Amino acid sequence: MRNTPTLAETKQRLERTGQEHLLAFWESLDDARRAELLAAIATLPLEHLGSMLSQAASLAKPAASEIRPVRPYMRGMADAEKYRTIGDDLVRRGKVAAFIVAGGQGTRLGWKGPKGTFPATPVAGKPLFRVFAEQIMAAERAYGVRIPWFVMTSEANHDETERFFEDNRWFGRPRGDTMLFAQGMVPSVTLDGKVMLEHAWQPALNPDGHGGSLKALRQAGAIDHMQASGIEHLCYFQVDNPNVHVIDPLFLGLHVAAPDSSAEMSSKSVLKRDTTEKVGVFVKAPRLTVLEYSDAPKEISDARDASGEIIYGEGSIAIHVIGVEFIRKLTDHPLGSVLPWHRAIKKVPFVDPATGQRTEPAEPNAIKLESFVFDALHEAESPIVLRTDRVEEFAPIKNASGEDSPATSKAIQVERAVRWLKEAGVPVPCHANGQPDCAIEISPLTARGPDDLRRHPPAKAIVAGSEMLL
């Protein structure tokens, strides 16, 4: 491990890169703070910062004339069983691992702690992390294989997340089958490109975006570990969606065997509810990309076909399968990743190097850089999209109330459970309007879908007005 650069070496580097102000308070710091500051400066990408900012500022958005709709695969397609069988074999041979991006806090939900610790399910109130752990365990039992789980945290929640896993005894899974590691950070900079100080001894940093997850995997040694273990594909998902199918054999089979897939990166979509829903959509421009709702020209976002269906309606739900060798290729780069930087102008509190005063800005004063994992689609030779069912796989928890809240997520979870039971031939009490007159939660350890419920139906009848955990 390289030693932290000396003060003299750091001064020379700061002079070369025009960031001398980072040592403005050197004389007032004690030895511990001085060492902390030198170590922090050593991690900053100062030599690349100018090009990072320039690239982010010049990032082009596709013109409406360049944008074409995507033709996704459908979950109910005629040869789905063929691809499901291929995916089953892939999992059974130990070629698949799970990867969750879980760096967020539950602040927007009024929850003190990592978002993965939020009680998300409608009856038992299981935390999100347990929901996903049980899914992985259920798949391990079904396939007779161990499935590693990679969990990306953040600097803000890593220690608390690790304690939560330990307190829950790693959810009944072997400790060695879960790897936790923190997301990378990048400096927040002023509008004229100067790295900001959060404290006199600490540069201001922000997480490098979900695109940084690929670099974080590489730096944590996870890619080497996967390839040494024979793992070839990674099931990527985010922490806020309890209905995700963590291990989906149909999706995996399409990823590796669809005739137009390069088996590098594949994505799932759901059809947008309406043209105003605030989700990015998959489009060809000319390569497959996710067009953010805020960047979509009105003639694109509002377009409908003759039958009234939204033409550009393949909403991104942040579920992907990514080839491990593809991730290695993407992360062979001086900055750890070839993914482009995006910028956002935000309000960032800072210590003024000239006065030493801490300032809470009233207006946006800083550039935050981040990368997006879906930009990896640009680098894939032939990525594909699988349209899935919204109730089946998308019940996000993002807001404290209203759309995408705990209440709406629980309603969707119950709706899916009732759908599974009905498909399995199990009577479910409903109101006159067809809505369920009960609250049902199905543990992944009980059933991974309707087929499991057909084989093992509930021992007790479902009673109107009841809450039941199966």
Image: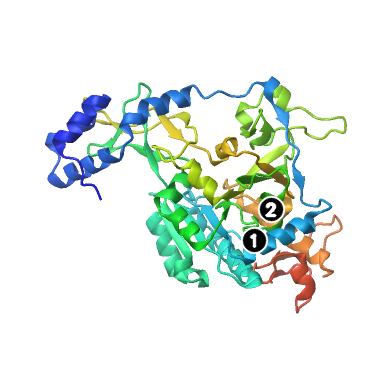
- Disc 2 crowd rating (10 Å Cα; few below 14, some 14-19, many 20+) is many
Residue on which the image places disc 2: 251
Does residue 154 appear to the left or right of 379 in the view shown? left
Q: Position of residue 230 (x, y in %)?
A: 53, 61
Residue bearing the label numbered 1: 90
Q: In x, y percent, where is residue 117?
A: 50, 59
Contact between marks 2 and 1 (CB within 8 A): the answer is no
Query: Can residue 298 be spotted in the picture?
Result: yes
Secondary structure state at the residue bearing disc 1: helix
217 and 33: which is toward the camera = 217
Residue at horizontal 82 percent and vertical 70 percent from the top: 426
Three-letter code for the amino acid on which mark 1 is drawn: Leu
Residue 287 location (% of width, % of height): 64, 32
Q: Quadrant of residue 274?
A: top right
Q: Nearer the viewer, residue 200 or 304?
A: 304
Kindly identify the amino acid type of the residue bearing the numbered disc 2. Answer: Phe
Give left or right: position of 253 versus 10.
right
Residue at the spot 44% in from the left edge and 55% down from the top edge: 224
Looking at the picture, does residue 401 appear above or below residue 87?
Answer: above
* Residue 394 visible, this angle: no
Give the percent coordinates (x, y) of residue 105: 46, 50
Please indicate whether residue 17 sits to the left or right of residue 74 in the image: left
Task: Tell me the CA gap for discs 2 and 1.
Answer: 11 Å
